Amino acid sequence: MPGLIYPLAIFIALAAGWLLMAMAGHDAFSVYTQAFSKVFLSWHGLSETLVQAVPLGMGALGVAMAARLKLWNIGVEGQFMFGAFCATGLALYLDTLPAVALLPLMLVAGFMGGGLLAALCGLLRARLGINEIVTTLLLNYVVGLWVGYLVYGPWQALGSNVPETTEFAAAAQLPVIFPGTRVHLGLVALLIFAALCHFFLNNSVWGYRIRACGDNPRAARTAGIDYKRSVLLVMLLSGGLAGAGGMLEVSGAVHRLQDGTTPFFTMTVFMAAWLARLDLAGILVAGFLLAGLQVAGYYMQFMGLPSALVTVIEGVALLSMIAFEPLRLNALKRAGKGA
Amino acid sequence: MDALWGLLPNILAAGVAAGTPVLLAALGEIITERSGVLNIGLEGIMIMGCVSAVMVTLDLHSPLAGLAAAMAVGGIMGLLHAAFTITLKGNQIVSGLALVLLGSGLSTMLGKGVLGQPVFDLFYPEALPWLADLPYVGGIFFKHDPLTYGGILLAPLVWFFLQHTRPGLLVRAAGESPETADSLGAPVALVRYGAVIAGGALAGAGGAFLPLVQTPSWVEGMTSGSGWIALAVVIFARWDPGKALLGAWLYGAVQALGFRLQAVGVPIPSQFLNMLPYLAPIAVLVITASRSRGQAIAPRALGLPYERESR
């Protein structure tokens, strides 16, 4: 049973969290049951999970896109924020446009902003052989400081001492799709982006080329596929997905640009992509589950537990997944032989 | 501008010290990567080094004990990475990211009790007799804390170890051609374990520098990217300890320059000055890479798990 490792990894991660809570003197059982029922068995929890799933899903699609070419884009957080910044610029300065014009423009701006930032790293990788792990990651800090400069400086809402812009005009806000909740049109956009990625990677010539390059760059080069151009394109799309995610988040959920994004966004997103083994439908499921974990984290904070607990649980789950990988491969091999 | 020139020795001196955490982590990573294992979890190991150094130093009133604890914790995290990537042959990048997650989360939880508590037992700067009186260089290189001296001494030692000792040769063999090393009877897995654990311990020591020298207390996320910069320094240095020294000083000097400019009240927003330490490594990689036309000289088996059956 190769699939068995998923529940096993989750079990170990929860056990580690249990241990930490027990050490801090908390009743772990009641924390877990309360968090679970609040997140997955209540309308409010479920709808908040769907809201959180949008940025996570978009980031995970971006990671998976780059991973198809064996590239490691760990700058999705920076690209996400840069996309949010570009979209915010339009929301603040073109606020007289009607929503039908403004929202698509913001989405394009977010996509291109995040995409170009990642493509820059792709260019350095393709032209100069500079490792994309380091460049994409370092840019996270640069973009974070840039957004910090804006929301503490020129873009700060007038008369406010909170580091954020003023609330977007109604035309720059994505509409809510389930009345009474915060679930917004971004959820639909996420599903469309996932479908587009699926089509692009599996049914288009470019997708075929990218997979060929990822599996065997040398063979692909011999077959006349331009590896450097593939790297550029993939990084553009990868960062673009993250940047579009940033636009969906500011326009759909937050309605303003704020200082300080989700901590460990990159790592969580990476986990979603890795858990799903880059399978796009799996990414949506993993993104939903991890979003649930994040919402559970908010509830746990209300119960007086540190939010870092969720980070630890995620880290342990990721490590367990790696540890069980040989088990899964063995099971797969055996299943293959039996068939 | 004249005022800035006057500050130059001051900035360089501060840079030599500020580069120490990155230098220690980068030297460790050079040993790790030379053995064929990539550990991108430095950021997580360093932050655990910070928090363990603070906790133990507050408890035992000895910075040396704090340093030892940070190195032990770093070594354990290295061991974890080694077990996951060498024995279980897991993906090295994912395991490294998991270390970052784990380190960030655990350090925040463990550090709750000591958050903001001032640490009094620190490594203080000590001027070296005679050398500190040398004109110009004396002030830049010889008026530092013991950890900074240690890092500077360690660079040639690591170089000597890798190039001129038998264990060092084994490390390089494991990273260049594990098949050959194995066929000659070298214990590849054991060598890699040793290298990854040593690398983790050094990253832990780099983390300990921050609370025990620079900012004498525990602050959440106080490494602020040093681990990632150390990775950039390793690439810039082309896995050569001597050049890592140069890279770390360059980073330190850029960081110190940013702080000084802020202190003098230059009319540039602080955020832009704070970007310098993150932009500088990218700029330096671009400049050095375009000169050598992208001829990377990474250890040949870097990132690849070694499987005997596949020989």
Image (cartoon, rainbow, N blue to C red):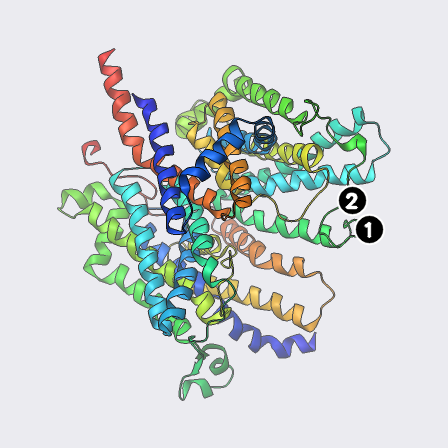
Question: Given contact means CB atoms under 8 Å apart, are the residues at marks 1 and 2 in contact?
Answer: yes
Decide: is B72 above or below A169.
below
Out of B303 and B76, give the one closest to the viewer. Answer: B76
Q: Which residue is mark 1?
A: A158
Task: Inspect the image, locate mark 1, and give the three-letter code of the amino acid beneath it.
Answer: Leu
From the image, which quarter does the N terminus of chain A lie in?
top left
Out of A12 and A150, give the one closest to the viewer. Answer: A12
Residue displayed at 48% across by 80% down: B137
Question: Which residue is most to the left?
Answer: B185
Q: Secondary structure at mark 2?
A: loop
Residue displayed at 44% across by 22% down: A223
**Left or right side of A244 for A231:** left
Residue A231 placed where, x, y %? 52, 33
Q: Could you tell which of marks 1 and 2 lies nearer the N-terminus?
A: 1
Badge 1 sits on which subunit?
A
Q: Which residue is mark 2?
A: A166
Decide: is B180 above or below A145.
above
Q: Which mark is residue A51?
A: none
